[in-house]
Amino acid sequence: MDIRIDDLDRKILSEMQADASRSLEEIARAVGSSKTPVWNRIKKLREAGIIKNHTVQLDAEALGFEACFFVLIRTSEHEASWQKAFLKALHERPEVQEAHRLAGDIDYILKVRVKNARAYDVFYQALISEVRVFNVTALLSMEELKSTNALPLLDQ
């Protein structure tokens, strides 16, 4: 569905990105509108697939997931069957928070959140037992400086 987004839609989306748990009344007040038009716009944005789902953001460290690794993967395999097996392996592992196919020397980058280095090794051993990779480099994040899923909607 092709949909046009106006300034009010952007304001609503920005408010929801900041805290989607707020009431419709609070969001409407924050964007300078009333509840019914805001509800109708949110419904339209959901139907168009712009609003995908509502989740909660958990504190990984508070839950014991203290290690975040960025895993760089190079492969010499590019056949459809390998890619299918690789995607299956990624989707079956909840430790993989993000996975991207890249242009350049590195084929894939993964963001992997685990409790510690030993847990990363268990993840790594399982992954390489399922799919052949040419080279894997794991980079441990020492400190998270910024993390957001929010899009810069109001800067457009």
Image: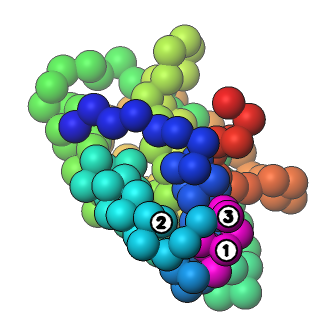
The picture quadrant where one finds residue 77 is top left
Prevalent SS, magenta region:
helix
Q: Secondary structure at mark 1?
A: helix
- Give the residue furthest to the top: 104
Q: Quadrant of the N terminus?
A: top left
Of pointers 2 and 3, the one earlier in the residue sequence: 3
Q: Which residue does the image show at 69% across and 55% down from the upper left?
A: 148
For residue 76, say whether it is visible: yes
Can you identify the residue that label 2 sits on? Answer: 38
Q: Which residue lies at the image location 67% right of the left edge and 64% below the top edge?
A: 32
Q: Which residue is mark 1?
A: 29
- Tags 3 and 1 touching, CB below 8 Å: yes
Q: How is the image coloured?
A: rainbow
Q: CA distance from mark 2 to mark 1?
A: 10 Å
Amino acid residing under circle 3? Gly
Residue 125 shown left or right of residue 147 in the figure: left
The amino acid sitting under disc 1 is Arg
44 to the left or right of 17: left
Query: Which dot marks residue 32?
Result: 3
